């Protein structure tokens, strides 16, 4: 659906940037560019009339259809006006209101699923779009004071969604969008900004006596994208033909508020975060996803919670995965990051597990940062190739570097780094895993103190803790006069060692 909106409506093309080529472009060339983009996105285009009227090319009754196995979407625009300005540029205007119809049919056997349809209306009064450049390198410059998407009708999805209303509004949009190339494959380069985006939704159901209300606000939005677009009807073929995209989305702050009521019993969730964003990149050989935000506070209240209100805060959240997706005879890079810094809960929650305040109530941190190399013997997006690969391995792990391991909670902290390589010719020594070579260095601080405090709280007894401490002493080195343990885990000569003691 997103590709249809980008190609079919100037308003939804408001996410792109590029510099303008100095050349004359005609209305017919701009219209041809639109048609090529729609076709490359796998859409079916129809019009009732396309005619010249002086310096204007008027397209009437445009409809776009896009279908998949279990869904379809249709967009219609009453009239699009491509007006040649006399300065080599073309101004495009069209209907202020654009309806979109989406239908879904669940696959057979999906429990309780029903066919559904919904109608969304895009409203874009005052939108201005100017095309310039040349036929094989067109730049669109777009401004709009407001763009609103409103849910007009919803049928068949869930009986609880009765009297549902929803709309999302972007304000003060500025964007540029460059399209280069002739034919199905086209290069794009783009960026956009918007002052804010607001989301409002509410629903009531008199039969179930339930209701909910939601608001959300995102400030100072920006994004950019670049890549190569091809015929998207088949993802595997599109990637082989050169499809590639890199995009990012960032914001300065965000907040939301959700209230629900079920038979007179209310619950509430709210939250706010400082700067954050996400990034995505994909081509035939790699897939990357990156999410991050900071300074987040969440609040929960409701009848199912053990305390009247639960507050959660954290300083930083990040998740990133970069993985190979294409068949290669040589190892490819991969990376993984999961980070949660300064996670904490409100004192009423702490009081449930630590009423005497024995533990330090400081924020917990979990960080796992790793990278390495792997080889794939199949293209992950080629379903046909996967279907003929049988039980053969999809790939091999060649190397793994542990850049950072950090776990900290209640005054104790585990840290580690290391590097391993793998011999994939031997899958027997380690029970189906390739034989590793290398070492991992670990350090644990504050563990003995934490165990003593857990005993004082009554969750463990002295005998249990003594057994844990003796086990740790067998495989670690302790620092004099410090609550600190270190250990070196080493793989060598097809064996596994902990502080020099062979365990396998």
Image: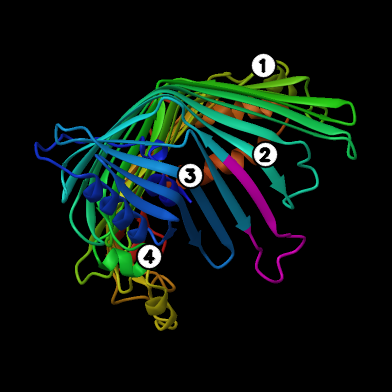
Q: Who comes first in sequence, dot 1 or dot 3? A: 3
Magenta: main secondary structure: loop
Mark 2 or 3: in front is 3
Q: Nearer the viewer, residue 264 or 464?
A: 264
Q: Is residue 368 visible?
A: no
Q: How is the image coloured?
A: rainbow
Q: Which residue bears the numbered disc 4? A: 235
Q: Who comes first in sequence, dot 2 or dot 3? A: 3
Q: Position of residue 467 (x, y in %)?
A: 60, 43
Q: CA distance from mark 3 to mark 4?
A: 32 Å
Q: Position of residue 416 (x, y in %)?
A: 36, 40
- Image quarter for residue 320? top left
Badge 3 crowding class, 10 Å Cα cut-off, few under 14, some 14 to 19, many 20 or more, is: some
Q: CA distance from mark 1 to mark 3?
A: 59 Å
Badge 3 marks a residue whose secondary structure is strand
Residue under the point 46% across and 37% down: 95
Residue under the point 35% across and 68% down: 236
Residues tagged 2 and 4 counted as in contact (Cβ below 8 A): no
Q: Position of residue 327 (x, y in %)?
A: 27, 70
Q: Which residue bears the numbered disc 1? A: 347
Q: Nearer the viewer, residue 96 or 417?
A: 96
Q: CA distance from mark 2 to mark 3?
A: 80 Å
Q: Which residues are magenta?
A: 104-120
- Image quarter for residue 280? top left
Mark 3 or 4: in front is 3
Q: Who comes first in sequence, dot 2 or dot 1? A: 1
Can residue 307 be found in the magenta stretch? Answer: no
Q: CA distance from mark 1 to mark 4?
A: 50 Å
């Amino acid at each position: 659906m997103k590709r249809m909106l980008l190609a079919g409506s100037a308003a939804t093309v408001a996410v792109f940037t590029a510099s303008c080529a100095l050349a004359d472009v005609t209305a017919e060339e701009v219209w041809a560019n639109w048609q090529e983009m729609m076709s490359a996105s796998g859409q079916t285009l129809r019009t009732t009339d396309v005619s010249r009227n002086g310096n204007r090319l008027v397209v009437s009754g445009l409809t776009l259809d896009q279908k998949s196995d279990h869904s379809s979407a249709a967009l219609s625009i009453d009239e699009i006006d491509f007006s040649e300005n006399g300065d080599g540029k073309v101004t495009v205007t069209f209907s202020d209101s654009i309806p979109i119809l989406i239908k879904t049919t669940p696959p057979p056997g999906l429990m309780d699923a029903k066919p559904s349809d919904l109608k969304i209306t895009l409203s874009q009064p005052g939108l201005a779009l100017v095309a310039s450049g040349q036929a094989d390198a067109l730049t669109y410059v777009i401004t709009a004071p407001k763009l609103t998407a409103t849910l007009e009708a919803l049928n068949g999805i869930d009986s609880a969604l009765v009297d549902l209303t929803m709309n999302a509004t972007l304000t003060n949009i500025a964007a540029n969008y460059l399209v280069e190339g002739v034919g199905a494959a086209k290069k794009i380069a783009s960026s956009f900004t918007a002052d804010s985006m607001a989301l409002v939704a509410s629903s009531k159901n008199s039969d179930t006596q339930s209701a909910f209300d939601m608001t959300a606000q995102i400030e100072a939005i920006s994004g950019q994208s670049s890549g190569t677009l091809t015929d998207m009807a088949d993802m595997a073929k599109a990637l082989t033909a050169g499809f590639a995209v890199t995009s990012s989305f960032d914001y300065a702050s965000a907040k939301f508020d959700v209230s629900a009521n079920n038979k007179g019993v209310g619950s509430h969730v709210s939250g706010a975060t400082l700067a954050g964003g996400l990034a995505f990149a994909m081509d035939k050989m790699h897939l990357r996803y990156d999410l991050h935000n900071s300074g987040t506070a969440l609040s929960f209240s409701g009848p199912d919670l053990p305390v009247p209100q639960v507050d959660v805060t954290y300083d930083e959240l990040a998740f990133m995965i970069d993985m190979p997706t294409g068949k290669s005879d040589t190892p490819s890079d991969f990376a993984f990051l999961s980070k949660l810094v300064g996670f904490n809960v409100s004192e009423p929650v702490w009081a449930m597990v630590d009423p005497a305040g024995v533990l330090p109530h400081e924020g917990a941190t979990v960080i796992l940062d790793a990278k390495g190399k792997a080889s794939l013997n199949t293209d992950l997006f080629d379903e046909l190739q996967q279907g003929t690969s049988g039980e053969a391995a999809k790939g091999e792990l060649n190397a793994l570097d542990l850049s950072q391991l950090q776990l900290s909670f209640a005054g104790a902290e585990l840290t580690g780094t290391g590097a391993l390589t793998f011999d994939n010719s031997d899958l027997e020594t380690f029970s189906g895993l390739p034989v590793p070579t290398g070492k991992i260095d670990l350090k644990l601080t504050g563990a003995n103190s934490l165990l003593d405090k857990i005993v004082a709280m009554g969750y463990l007894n002295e005998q249990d803790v003594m057994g844990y401490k003796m086990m740790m002493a067998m495989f670690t080195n302790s620092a004099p006069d410090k609550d600190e343990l270190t250990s070196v885990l080493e793989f060598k000569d097809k064996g596994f060692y902990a502080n020099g003691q062979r365990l396998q």
